[in-house]
Amino acid sequence: MDIVKRPDKRAERSRRTREKVIQAARELFVAQGYGATSLQEVADRAGVAVQTVYFAFGNKRTLFKDVVDTSIAGDIEPVAIMDREWFRAACAEPAAAGQLRAHVRGTSEILGRVAPLMPMIESAGAADPQIAAGWPDGPDPRYVVQHAAAQALVGKPGARPDVSVAMAADLLFCLLSPQLYLLFVQDRGWSQDQWEEWACATLTAQLCTGPATGAAPATGAAPAAGAGPEVCP
């Protein structure tokens, strides 16, 4: 007789509670800053007891890190970016242009979630120096991801033979940075789709053989809605 495993209702309730608390904390941290937000306010926004927040996260610093981590990942699952399906699928693309297109799309989704948090992250570090001390030492995790993407890309059909892994990693790291994304999307009013098309065209021109099939919008003014160039192969 087959044994049917019943879903763990307690684990599911715990997961939903964590999601609610993290979402509430994200909203409050962005709206009023890390330092000005109390765990009681987070609990009230999430509709749970403040003791529940302490039990699940321990303190505000841990909750802050979970807000950042889940914004990067897109969910609360403990799966590293390089182990995510979208990243593996992008690296598995047979040609360089196809990998770039998939990689920029996946990175664009992350930046759409993370870039709005950048001012809050900076202010949180200023308000609580232990936050910065809590990040792991060593290379920037974002660079590690981009370096892995560069390793997968260099040598594929369509990749420029004169571009090294180090150069490709630097281009991916800089052009797909949250700071540059914010300059275009927040400061200059580009849509996320328009930024994605520009980033794909620029990286294709830098990393792939052959000219890009479009031009980036003229600088100095935000492009009209829906006017992003069709540039990615």
Image (spheres, helix red, strand yellow):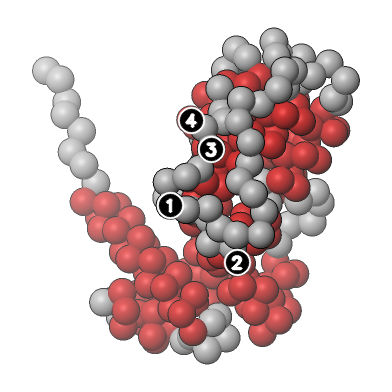
- Give the amino acid at mark 1: Ala
Q: Residue at x 20, y 33 (%)?
A: 5
- Give the amino acid at mark 4: Glu
> Quick check: marks 3 and 4 in contact, CB under 8 Å?
no
- In the displayed orientation, state which residue is furthest to the left: 1
Name which of mark 3 and mark 2 comes first in the sequence.
Answer: 2
Mark 2: few, some, or many residues within 10 Å (few <14, many ≥20)? few
Rendered position, 95 above or below 86: above
Q: Residue at x 24, y 46 (%)?
A: 8
Mark 3: few, some, or many residues within 10 Å (few <14, many ≥20)? some
88 relative position to 148: left or right:
left
Name which of mark 3 and mark 4 comes first in the sequence.
Answer: 4
Residue 229 rendering spot, x and y as whole percentages: 53, 37
**Residue wearing tag 2:** 187
Rendered position, 104 above or below 129: above
Who is closer to the viewer here, 10 or 20? 20
Q: CA distance from mark 3 to mark 4?
A: 28 Å
- Give the amino acid at mark 3: Pro
**Residue wearing tag 3:** 229
Name which of mark 1 and mark 4 comes first in the sequence.
Answer: 4
Mark 4: few, some, or many residues within 10 Å (few <14, many ≥20)? few
Badge nearest the viewer, 1 or 4: 1
Q: CA distance from mark 3 to mark 2?
A: 20 Å
Q: Which mark is residue 85?
A: 4
Rendered position, 137 above or below 93: below
Name which of mark 2 and mark 4 comes first in the sequence.
Answer: 4
**Which quadrant of the structure image shows residue 91?**
top right
165 relative position to 186: left or right:
right
Q: CA distance from mark 2 to mark 1?
A: 15 Å
Name which of mark 2 and mark 1 comes first in the sequence.
Answer: 2
